[in-house]
Every structure is written in structure tokens, then in C-alpha cells.
Amino acid sequence: MSDNQSIQAAVAQGKLLNSAAQTIEAFRQAKLPQWASLSIDELIAQEAWQELNDRFYRFLEFGTGGMRGRTMGVVKAKAETGTLSGLGSPEYAAIGSNMLNDFTLIRAVIGLYRYTAKVLVQRSVTTKPRIVIAYDVRHFSKHFCELAASTWVKLGGDAFIFTDPRPTPQLSFSVRWLGAHAGVVITASHNPPHDNGFKAYFDDGAQVVPPHDTGIVKEVDLVPLSETTSFLIKDISKVTLLSEEADKAYLAVASQSVLDTHVIKRAKLSVIFTNIHGTGGVHGPALLKQFGALVKSVPEQAAFDPNFPTVKSPNPENAEALSRAVALAEKENADLVLATDPDDDRMGCAVRNRTGKMELLTGNQVGALLVDYRLTRFKELGIIPKQGSKNVCIIKTFVTTSLQDAIGHAHGVKVINTLTGFKWIASKMRAYEVALQKAMGPAFRYDEITLAEKARLHLEHSTFFAFGNEESYGYLPNDLLRDKDGNAACLMFAELASWVKDRGLTVPEYLDQIYLKYGFYLEGTINLYYEGASGNAKIKRIIDSYRSQKPQVFGSIAVTQFQDFGREVILDADGDQIPKQDLYVVSLANGATFAARGSGTEPKMKFYLFAQAKAASLEALPSVKATVKLELEQLKALIESDARLRAES
């Protein structure tokens, strides 16, 4: 039986999706390199229909973090595996329209280039489209970076790349610093080792939002697969390699995240740092040492390694990923553990409590601590008014703890809630920058003024961005770059921990003071993973059923309000309309709430749970914490059970 007959039979038997069959045929007609054609033939010969479905049922889409996908299949073809590299990378990224490989990457670059060029024409800009590209430590990251830059230059643009892995926040900054029109980071953040990604940025240094994201996707969709083959051979002879000057410029900005430049050294803060094999090791330890921290890195996790061999997942949200750092901190009697993810935009930490044990903090707890500390210090330093101001804001996502809303309002500042993804936080920052630029005139150089001057001008003409964060361990102290920054987060938290230590407290004690003042808030998450084409269908069933069959009750707890962000008009604190998205926020009769959404970067359905209660005294706080925790765990089980039923219905 020929390959075509095998495919037709598999479709007829329901083993192969028709969409996958059509895309496979398009690939086979596209004059692919020999290894790619042989790989498809191998999988057909093996009758690996589920693998072919997962690889070909769609083209990779842009989500909240851009485009991510597997670079290695579950079932691997010998032709694509070829000769492994020293770190175990296959010779070629796996073939497939739903994989991140040379073909899908080139399509994305072509689409991004053509969209950027059109925008420049609309703006009457006559310079070549300029892009900056960075990459992390993952399989194929450097190759994809060079291939993207080569493609961009062949299309007629100018491209700048780093010679070694660099953090995502440095790319965000470098777009602004170089006056580039677009940027890309080759990374899959904390995803498993078999994944990689393409994070697209625009001229403000932020990830793309409407209309740019949909505009880019439309341009990508217009690129025929056959066009990609002429870009497969890399040529970076005309690509500009960035020098140490780029590092120095970024480090100068990252250093500005510190408000008290002496407290870390004064407190003699001892830190155990781990980059979990990722790009946080490029700048993180040096920045901490610059301000006087006593830093030791976890030696077995310091080297770049795309396999992340010492952890189940290179995600600082997971306790297991910090276990080696915590063990070293216990041995060394260190004050603080700081950990960053592979592309260094997230930070996790552990702190020493009053009993002398290391205690992990959640992203919601870290965010709340930093919000309270930084607003307090901004007032003490005279950067914002002591009574607060409606022209000062903190920005967070709807799925980040409401404790920050309470803290912000108590400090007299505006609290802006956005959709999930730091690009939405950056979009608000851009609006505030544009408003100030308009007030000051075209000669005004926004990025060249001091923090105090920026605050003064924003207070008079716009809104001053004091802090931004999301519950998934992402924090940003200022708007000199437009994505969450693991390096700045490490510095900010080291400063906070030093300030607390200077006062004879522990960080958990400071957090309890916050709970007593504003209420105890507890959060939880549910992550339901569904891989491949069948998994995508299950996620869609959950999302669709929440809209068509709204939940009414969970156990004995009635639903009191259901917000559908995809259908309702919802405004933020500025009066701006929140873009439509399949996000649901459900309020319950017991005072708890939860949010439900599909992940934009991973094959999973996510639920965010929130509960709170007041504690009358420090003595009553442990009992309140236990009660709220039990209520949240019971609710979590009910929501998860309901979601799994919806996925299969």
C-alpha cells in the first residue's frame, strides 16, 4: 500500500484527522529537504497516526506568550533525529506544522517582517525593518535565533543578535535601547525540555497585543509552506552581533530596581541563587553581589543545559525545582533562596522563618510583599505623595490575588487589573508613556529621565507606574523595559528581605503583619494538561461548556455571579475596555471566587482559586489560615471534578 493509500485509509477509519491529512499532503508537495520527507514517510510507514495528528492537525498559533510547541516528537523519526549533539539535541527539529521547527519558524519570521514593514509604511518610516533576537539555553535555540536573523536580513531588514544566551527581559530592554521595530526571544520559558518557542515583541519592547498580534498571524497564514524552503540555509554574515555595550546598558537599568542602595550590604544578606540551568546565571549573581549580597550559586544547576537534568520541571513555581537551593541554604544558614526560570523572566524564593527553617513563598505572596514595601518606600522617599494619588498605579492581572487590590487602595493608589499575560500590563504602561509624551512634546526623551522626575511628570500629566506583577512569579519595578524581569525581581526581593532583617523581623512575620492589616488571602490553582489534537478538543469543550452550561453550584456552595470576559463589556480602573477573551470569573456564596481560562502557552486548562477571611489578632491568625485552607482544598476538588466531566462530555 502506498503512503497516499495508507493516509486515505487512516482517514476513512477515523485514525487520522482530515485536517492533518491535508497538511501532510501540503508538506509532501513543498520540495522539503530529504530528511524531512523521509521523516514523514517513516511515521506513515509506522502507522503513527496519533503522532501525525498531533504534529499536523493545525499550524502553531500565537497565544499570550507568542508561539510555543514541541521541537521533538513523542514518536521520533530516525531521519530527523540524525546525529545527536553533545547535549542530546537531535540533528533537526521535528517535522510538522504544529511543531516548532525551521519551517514554522521561518513562516513566523516572514509574517512578522511583512507586518512590521507595512506598519512602517503606514507611519511613513523609511528605514529598514529592524529586529533584535535573543535566545535561551534550549534545544535548537541558538540555531533558531540565527535562522530567524538570517531570514530577516534576506527579506531586506537589519537584524541584531546576541552571541550567547540572554534573558528575556534583556531582549525587551534592547528593543527600546536600539530603537528596533520588533524583537523576538527564542524560548519556551519553563516548559518541558522538548519544547521551544517564539516570543514576538513590538517597538515598545512589549509582547504583541491587538491589533499587532492578529495582524502578524494573518501575515503568517498567507505565507505558503513552499516559500520557506528558500530560507533554510543560514547566512548571518550581514547580521549585527551585539557587544558588551548591550549588557552594560541593560544592567544599568536592572540596577535601578533597587530603591535603597545600601540596605543589602548593611544587612549582610546571604543568598543561595539558582538559575536552574537557564539564563538567570548570566547576570543574576553579579547584580546581587554589586549591591553587597553574599551569594552562593547551586553548583550542579549553574551550567546551561537544555535537558534541565536536576529537576522534573525548570519552573520556580514548583517546590521541587528549588529543593537543591533550599538544602544548600539550610546547610549554609543563608537568609534567602532566589531562583529564576530558563529565560529569566520569573523568580521564585524561599525565606527563613522564626523557627529557623526555610519557607517557600508563592508568587501571590511575593507580589503582595513587594507592593506594600515599594509603595511604603516610594512615600518615604518622596517619590509619590504620602496620601497616595489616583495618578499612581500598580498593575496586576485578574487572576492575581485581591490582597494587592486591598493594599493598593489602602495606600491611595489606583489598581489596574488586566488579562493574563504581561503584555497586557505593558500595554497599559505604553498608554501612560504616550500620554506623557504627548503632553511634553516630540523633543521629550522618555527613557532618559530619572525615576523621581518621571514620577513627578506622570503625577501631573499621566499615570505613574509604580509596580507590575502577575501571580505566575513575574514582577517588574519600572517601565524602562516592558516584560517581567527575573533579575530585577531578585534585586527587589533581596532589598525587601534586607529591610526586614534590618528591623529584626523575618519575611513571614512581615507577611503576617500585612494579613492582619488587610485580611488573610489564600490562593490555589488547578492545571489540567491535555496534549495534542485530542487534548485541544477537551480544553475547548471545557471552555465552551462554561459558556453554554454555566455552573450553578459546587457541592452545597451556590454560584452567585458569573462573569464572561468573552461576551461582557468589562472596564478597568481607567475606564478602558478589557479585550474579549475566554476567561470566566465565578463568585460563590461562601465568599470565594475562581477564574477559568485555557493557557496561551501550554496545553492545559487553568483554574485560579481565591479565598479570604479577617483575623482579629495575631493569635487568631493560625486558626483563620487553617480554616480558609480547608475550604479552598474542598472547593478545589469540586471544581476539578466538574472540569474533568466537562472535558469528556
Image (tube, rainbow, N blue to C red):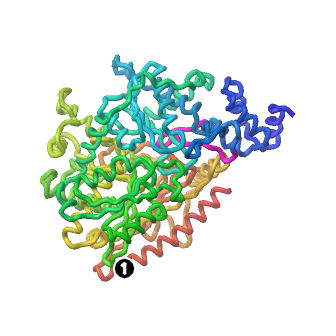
Which residue is most to the front?
Answer: 86
- Residue 546 inside the magenta-drawn segment: no
Q: Find residue 53 and report its horizontal and vertical position in percent.
A: 70, 42
Instruction: Quadrant for the N terminus, please.
Output: top right
Which residue is most to the left?
Answer: 382
Give the residue at x 41% y 59%: 298
Q: Find residue 321 and report its horizontal and vertical position in percent.
A: 47, 61
Which residue is most to the right?
Answer: 1
Q: Is residue 492 visible?
A: yes
- Per the image, label 1 sits on a secondary structure element best described as helix
Give the residue at x 18% y 56%: 260
Instruction: Quadrant for the C terminus, please.
Output: bottom right
- Residue 60 inside the magenta-drawn segment: yes
Q: Is residue 630 left or right of residue 222?
A: left
From the viewer's side, name the closer residue of 72 and 622: 72
Give the residue at x 19% y 52%: 389
- The residue carrying pointer 1 sits among few (fewer than 14), some (14 to 19) or many (20 or more) residues within 10 Å by Cα, namely few
Q: Quadrant of residue 96?
A: top right
Which residue, given by chain and number where applicable, does mark 1 sit on?
A: 622
From the viewer's side, name the closer residue of 407 and 325: 325
From the viewer's side, name the closer residue of 455 and 78: 78
Which portion, as a residue range, is magenta? 59-75
Q: Find residue 628 and report its horizontal and vertical position in percent.
A: 42, 74
Q: Vertically, is 417 above or below 149?
A: below
Q: Number of numbered discs present?
A: 1
Q: Is residue 151 visible?
A: no
Majority SS type along the magenta span: loop
Q: Find residue 133 and report its horizontal and vertical position in percent.
A: 42, 34
Give amino acid for label 1.
Pro
Q: Vertically, is 623 above or below 1?
A: below
